[in-house]
Image: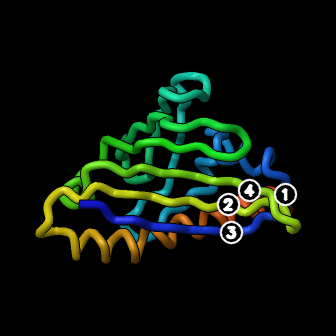
Amino acid sequence: MLLHLHAERVIAAAPAAVFALALDPRRFAPLFRGCGPVPAIRRIEALDAPAVGARRALENSDGSRLQERITAYDPPRRHAYTLSGLRPPLAWLVRTGEADWHFSAVPEGTRVQWQYTFQVAHAAVRPLAWLLLRGFMRPAMQRYLAAMARALTDPAGAT
């Protein structure tokens, strides 16, 4: 059973710049501040050069460590990855998350569409997983896209 989340924003920057920020471990981490029980990202370590199959290690503000494996890589249009290593209590609700980012040129700059698909651990926990992810992960995604827009249009106002 799957749960889908979507966040979208138009950013006043070229697709190549927006794509580069989304893949830059040093710049991405401080911009993702989390929301409620969804922790902020403290650090991202690229274990391989960006490509399909490449891995990244994430360290979150709550001490959890996650892994990403790139499943699609088409600069500057798309990248996707599988997120694994979730720990309780989220691991009791979902097994993995699959993120899919699309970047498209629009007159105002770049439309960023970020979708997350989570595999629910058990049918019985689907309502709780939906409330938690919709109430906290989706706002965390939206906050990140807003921070991304600030970082690309006014680097001094990014934090």
Left or right: 115 with respect to 4? right
- Which is closer to the viewer, label 3 or label 4? 4
Amino acid at the residue labelled 2: Val
- Which residue position is annotated with label 2? 112
Q: What is the C-alpha distance between the residues marked 1 and 3?
A: 12 Å
Q: Which residue occupies 57% across, 57% down?
A: 32
Instruction: Determine the secondary structure under disc 1.
Output: loop
State the image quarter where residue 120 is shown.
bottom left
Q: Quick check: 130 above or below 85?
A: below
- Which residue position is annotated with label 3? 9
Nearer the N terminus, badge 3 or badge 2? Answer: 3
Q: Quick check: 65 above or below 154?
A: above
Q: Say if mark 3 contacts mark 2, CB within 8 Å.
A: yes
Nearer the N terminus, badge 3 or badge 4? Answer: 3
Nearer the N terminus, badge 1 or badge 2? Answer: 1
- Which residue position is annotated with label 1? 13
